[in-house]
Image (tube, rainbow, N blue to C red):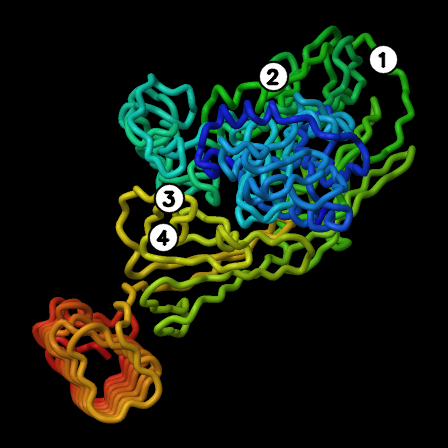
Amino acid sequence: MWGRRLTAAMIGVAGVLTMLASTLSAPAAQAGPRQARVVPIQVTGDPAKRFNLVILGDGYTAAELPEFREHVNQHLNVLWTIEPFTSYRNYLNVYAVEIGSAESGVDCDPGLDAPRRDTPLNMGFWDGCNPASVQRLLTVDHAAATRYADLVEGTTEANRQLLAIGNSDTYGGAGGAFATASGGNALSSLITPHELGHSLGGLQDEYDYYQRGVRGGTYSGGEPGSVHHTLLTAEQMRARRAKWWRWLGEPSESGGVIGAYEGGLYSSRGVWRPSRHSMMKSLGYYFDQVSRERMTQRISAKVNILADATPAAEPIGADRVVWVETLHPAGHELDVTWTLDGTALPTGNARSLDLAELDLAPGRHTLTATVVDPTGFVRDPAIRSSPALTRSRSWTVDTALRTPPEPTPAAFTGSTPTGEPVGAREVVHVDTTHPPTRRLHVEWTLDGRPVPNPGNDLGLDLAGLSLDPGAHTVTARVSGPDGSDSRIWTVDATDPAAGYRLSEPVLTVRKPGKPAEYIFNGPFTMELTARDDTEGHVVREFRTDGDGWYNYFGWPTDPDAPFRFTAEGTVIDDLVYGKLGTPRLVPWDEVPPGYGRHTIEYRAIDPAGNRGEPGEFVVTLLPEPPACTATITGRHAGPLRVSSGVTCLDGARVAGPVTVGPGASLVATDATITGPMRASGAGSVQLLRTAVRGPVRLSEGTGDVTVIGSRLFGPVALTGNREPVLAGSTVVGPLHCAGNDPAPDTLRAPNTLSGPATGQCTGLG
């Protein structure tokens, strides 16, 4: 293997129907099989028996095809981290079609005045350079895309999904049967799973607007046909056993709790969805359980989980070995049960049954094998019993018949791909030939040692082996009088490691055995890094305060820029990113600002599917200092009186008394003050990593009084202030606090006090 439509969520839903119609009417391009190469990326079986994802590249010259491969790698590695694709990736074949383009880029990128490009798929922004459309609507010539997709033998419009990736860093894409995405934008790889939610799962958009930046009104229709929208309350769903009642109260896979949250189907009121946010509302989160159940059903319905079996058209003899072949989810095994004349047989989930061992009474009997997917992703019994998750095959067994001999070599006919490492929690599988009168048994070894594997010996659940970190070798071997065969896999049992880099905090607090803590007085950035022992794109994720895991994609406008956190979030193209605390997804979301203390967890997922153990750190976000009206740097000799505005000391050295008058403000950062300091009725006083030699008296502040990471040499008095902060600082001398409302807060960053602490300051050390 190589190493989410611009969805309505992303394009602002500026007319999805118009978008699809315009894509269909795009002008024909000079497209054909010239300079095209089909690259099988993941082949798990016959394309006629799989769901096929065909990825086409456009606007990549021959020299730029390595970049296309990188983009495909990132798209897929993100997709495989999202359930149910993680568990059911073996149900999919993936092919890339490399097409050398005459010119680099796509049409009208980024503006209508940009040149048209000579590319095989004729991809273009502005709905193919339509001035009446929207810039981020990236379309593709359907006829050209179809001709190139047809190069992938065995795929048809019925069994495949096309994804066209354009060579562009501009934010854009489109959805429907022909999904598109720009390849180099930070959010590009998040388009594909959302689009598959639409085109494969039949899921609807959950956001509360139709046009970007314009809040939707009140839903006026009847009960939606959408499985994840309703007019019912949670109580009504339970009482009527309707919609997602089976999932109510569960912790949501996308954060929060499954319930009823107002908004969806482009309306802000009058309709409810299952989760506060999920992939169908905001790119970056997972599918919640309701959508995941539907996606599991739809993926499974694209294939037959009972892939093959002993022919059943004619009666078979009682000396026959009857077999079934199932599909193979990556994370669990399917259940196979056998019944004879309606009575269950103790077969232990085996995929074959030797009738000769049953000592059947003379005559005819009915043998049935039933394959069921026991996944916990499905709770609806109607889905569980549907052909998507339950299949059966029956045979008539006639004891009067004898099975003619048929020499069949013992060999493997399929398996988990061996070319890339498998993850330490995967179920590795094989399929074998089927001698008619003899059962084949697969022997498994781990690093040369036999591994007991009763029941379904065609699959080995690596998670049950509790592998030590490192690389391991798993071997499957089958043998018989007519030959033998083996398959060997390298198992990557080393979890990826994630790390982080933050912008400079006001204060860092480290305590033994505790996560690091950081105090910021304003926006800060976080870069997540990852390392792994194998090649390929490593996915990074984070979550705040136990909310849903969120894909780390850099920053929406630059994938190489770190993620930026603020109290309210940053509005980009009428969506909101980086809101600390309770997420704010669109500008009109009414949620509290993200000031205060928050826990951020982070982790990495490698190409083999190994999820590293999450790390965490704690941030406390304070409001930004007031804007400077005057700034002092370097040396300042003599008294400094601040009588109005905001004076900032930026690394300054002040020799002389400092006085801050009523209504005025002082912000000192990395400064040194020699002389007494006094503020009475000040608007704001902030001493950040600042040294003061002399008495300090801060009283009756009308704004914030904040002392963080500073060193104060002399008596200190804090009196009559509102919500003062004294954190991570050293006070050499007496410390007295009185009349503050509330008492000074340490932000859990202890102070060092070498002198008596009285009044409200008792215990601040």
Percent of width and height locating residue 226: 42, 23
Residue 232, quarter of picture: top left
Residue on which disc 3 sits: 585
**Amino acid of disc 1:** Arg
Percent of width and height locating residue 538: 60, 54
Say which residue appears at 30% left-offset and 55% top-offset. Answer: 594
Crowding near pointer 1: few (<14 within 10 Å), some, many (20+)?
few
Say which residue appears at 68% left-offset and 14% top-offset. Answer: 394
Q: Earlier in the sequence, mark 1 or mark 2?
A: 2
Crowding near pointer 2: few (<14 within 10 Å), some, many (20+)?
few
Residue 387, quarter of picture: top right
Residue on which disc 1 sits: 402
Alpha carbon of mark 1 to alpha carbon of mark 2: how far? 24 Å
Seen in the picture, residue 388 relative to 733 is either above or below; the reply is above
* SS category of the residue bearing label 3: loop
Q: Nearer the viewer, residue 161 or 139?
A: 139
Find out whether the residues at labels 2 and 4 contact each other: C-beta distance under 8 Å.
no
**Amino acid of disc 2:** Thr
Question: Can residue 324 be seen in this snapshot?
Answer: no
Percent of width and height locating residue 715: 16, 89
* SS category of the residue bearing label 1: loop
Q: Is 618 left or right of 500, judged from the image as shown? A: left
Residue 343 disc label: 2
